[in-house]
Image (cartoon, rainbow, N blue to C red):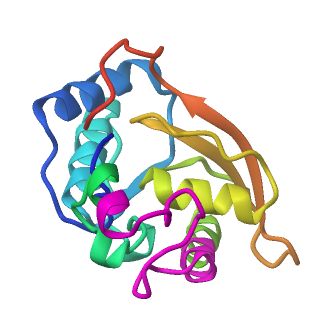
């Protein structure tokens, strides 16, 4: 299995650049594009915003991937070797970011965007881990999110439940452009 990148600030691979470029052919129009401040997300957002002819907003640290602590950069096998049974039992090391922290920061980011862009469609380039946490927190299915896949979020600032989670979006058929960014 792949590495737990977490908040490691890695570059896009050549495949990642190609996936981002091809995504512009499949995406509709948006009123704004924003991303996490991690290079892999910011570069993806730059490629997509340029391809769509939309200005790119400054990145937002609140859209970062989960902080995975000691697991950052480790493979599934390395985690299993050093923390036997943790993954199967859904246990995490002590410095792993909590779901509550993720939900709070991502919700705040989305509400701020919806307030700044009322009745608009904003494309947020973020990370699968935080999308999955948001889906679980709102009681909807938690499928694997493919590279350049995502999820629709309907955001209503000021509403008691400001986030409504929509469908998972997969821009590429399985294997169409590979899996790794």
41 vs 170, left or right, is: left
> Is any part of residue 154 visible from this angle?
yes
Is 55 covered by the magenta stretch?
no
Q: Position of residue 12 (x, y in %)?
A: 16, 44
Quick check: 44 above or below 146?
Answer: below
Give x and y (percent) for residue 59. Answer: 32, 67
Q: Is residue 85 magenta?
A: yes
Q: How many marks?
A: 0
Residue drawn where x is 32% and y is 57% of the image: 4
Question: Which of 180 and 11 lies nearest the eye of the viewer?
Answer: 180
Q: Quadrant of the N terminus?
A: top left
Quadrant in the picture for residue 73? bottom left
Q: x, y (%) of residue 42? A: 25, 55
Q: Quadrant of residue 134?
A: bottom right
Query: Magenta segment range?
Result: 79-107
Give the left or right position of residue 128, taking residue 100 as reference. left
Residue at image point 31% right, 60% down: 81
- Horizontally, is 4 left or right of 62 in the view? left
Q: Which residue is found at the position 62% from the left and 74% from the top? A: 103
Question: Does residue 91 sit above or below 168 in this rendering?
Answer: below
Res. 118 visible in picture: no
- The answer to which image quadrant residue 117 occupies is bottom right
Determine whether 8 is above or below 173 in the image: below
Residue at the image point whose x is 25% and y is 38% from the top: 181
Depth check: give the residue in front, 54 or 140: 140
Nearer the observer, 23 or 122: 23
């Amino acid at each position: 299995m792949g590495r737990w990148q977490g908040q490691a600030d890695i570059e896009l691979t050549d495949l990642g650049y190609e996936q981002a470029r091809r995504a512009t052919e499949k995406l509709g129009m948006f009123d704004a594009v924003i991303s996490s401040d991690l290079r892999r997300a910011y570069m993806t957002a730059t490629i997509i915003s340029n391809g769509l002819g939309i200005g790119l907003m400054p990145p937002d640290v609140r859209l970062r991937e989960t902080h995975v602590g000691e697991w950052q950069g480790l493979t599934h096998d390395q985690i299993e070797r050093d923390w036997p049974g943790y993954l199967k039992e859904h246990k995490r090391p002590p410095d792993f970011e909590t779901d509550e922290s993720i939900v709070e920061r991502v919700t705040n980011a989305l509400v701020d965007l919806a307030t700044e862009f009322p009745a608009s469609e904003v494309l947020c380039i973020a990370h699968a881990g935080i999308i999955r946490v948001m889906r679980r927190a709102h009681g909807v299915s938690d499928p694997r999110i493919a590279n350049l896949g995502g999820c629709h979020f309907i955001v209503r600032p000021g509403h008691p439940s400001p986030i409504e989670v929509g469908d998972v979006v997969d821009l590429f058929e399985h294997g169409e452009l590979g899996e790794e960014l």
